[in-house]
Image (cartoon, helix red, strand yellow):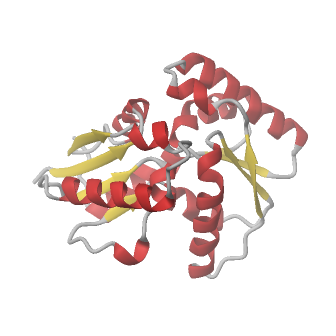
Amino acid sequence: MKKRLGCFHAHHSNIEHIEKALKPYNIELIHFVDPGLDRIKMDSNFTEEVAQKKIKDTLEWISSCHVDAILITCTFFTANIEEDKLAYSIPIIKIDDPLFHSICEKDEPQILVFTNPNTVEGTMNQLINFATKQKKNIQVEPYLLENTFNLVMEGKKEEYIESVSNGLNRLIINHPDKIISAAQLSMVPSAENIESKTDTYVGNHLKSLSNYLEELLKLNVYQ
């Protein structure tokens, strides 16, 4: 039977990345896009509680839509999930989990690169917690490519890809002893672009996502 995966996005641009990663599989993707939190998170009256309630309400709505699992692709959403209040009969998959697993498998010093300043602290805290549970000692520092995330939110896709690609390339040149990884799904095209041009490994979410979901959901590949 074909599995159904509910995908919770903050921006429609993430849809194509998930569609691409899961194209080989017999799975139906149902996309839910809510850019609202990204629009209001800088408001003076915005609180962490507002974000947590909205995310919780949306997850409950998606889980009622006859899906077999939920994939959350926004790192701002995953950083604001109240883990102790997650009680669903279906798997809730955070886009970061496969990437975190990959990071924890490496012994070398690493740099985790962000474009969205609002996700840095939450994602790093989750990475540290993930590594602790896995009993892994990691050497990872965050790096923010400033003034880039607004481009993707404004729909300036090509400018965003170019700006992020340039930033990743600079880090590779300046830190040849460290492994570079992109922390957000929107950065995947840039990571793949620079990896191809420099022949240098650049970690990204899609490298391990498809295998992770195939195993978790017992997906079948189209013949």
In the rendered image, the quadrant that contains the C terminus is top left
74 lies above or below 140: above
Residue 204 image position (x, y, % from top left) = 58, 45
Residue lying at 49% horizontally and 20% vertically, measured from the top left? 155
Residue 111 image position (x, y, % from top left) = 75, 52
**121 left or right, relative to 91:** right
Residue 153 image position (x, y, % from top left) = 51, 28
**138 left or right, relative to 103:** right
208 lies above or below 12: below
Give the image quarter of residue 94: bottom left
Residue lying at 40% horizontally and 78% vertically, measured from the top left? 84
Residue lying at 17% horizontally and 55% vertically, measured from the top left? 67
Q: How many marks?
A: 0
Residue lying at 70% horizontally and 30% vertically, measured from the top left? 147
Q: Nearer the viewer, residue 23 or 141?
A: 141
Residue 80 in sight from this viewpoint: no
Give the image quarter of residue 172: top right
Residue 192 image position (x, y, % from top left) = 60, 33
Q: Name the outermost residue toward the front.
A: 45
Residue 15 in sight from this viewpoint: yes
